[in-house]
Amino acid sequence: MTEELISQEKFEELTKELDELRTTRRREVAEQLEYARSLGDLSENAEYQEAREMQSAVEERIGKLEAILKNAKIVKSAKTDVVGMGSTVTVQKLGATDKHTYIIVGAEEADMLSGKISYHSPLGNALMGKKKSDEFSFHTPKGTQKYKILKVE
């Protein structure tokens, strides 16, 4: 896994989630497994199968979080006129009248509904390093999109 840029807030949130999974959630799943085992025949025990699947999901998430946190590089959002992590950018598609404002974040923080786009996304990647008034384009499944940066905060 490569280095992943992440905000301090998201780093702390993921660390807290990892701690919760390692302690509380693992214990809860272990208790459910023990109870399901006590019910008898494991080959036809739906509760046991469900508990095993839950255990697998918890361990998978723990592994993913450990990898993210191990490779995380905490980035403080520096308020400059150049688009970078943490920048709030207002863009307008060339030939359109509507404007869109996005915050550039790491992959784990991306949430399109709240206007947070990953710097890995086609738009986020195209925005990185640009300044106010710059025009840029990027490729999507619908073809090449052309935008202009109206504001960088």
Image (cartoon, rainbow, N blue to C red):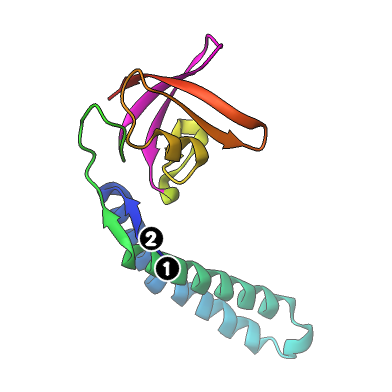
Residue 13 appears anywhere in the view: no
Q: Can you say which quadrant of the picture contains the C terminus?
A: top left
Residue 151: % across, % down: 33, 19
Residue 69: % across, % down: 33, 64
Residue 36: % across, % down: 64, 82
82 lies left or right of 57: left
Secondary structure under tag 1 reads helix
Instruction: Please say if the residues under marks 1 and 2 sit with CB atoms less than 8 Å apart.
Output: yes
Determine the residue positioned at 67% across, 80% down. 48
Q: Identify residue for label 2.
A: 17
Residue 22 appears anywhere in the view: yes
Residue 94 is covered by the magenta coloring: yes
Q: Identify residue for label 1.
A: 21
Residue 26 is covered by the magenta coloring: no
Q: Distance between the Cα atoms at labels 1 and 2? A: 6 Å
Determine the residue positioned at 28% across, 57% down. 73
Front residue of 145 and 2:
145
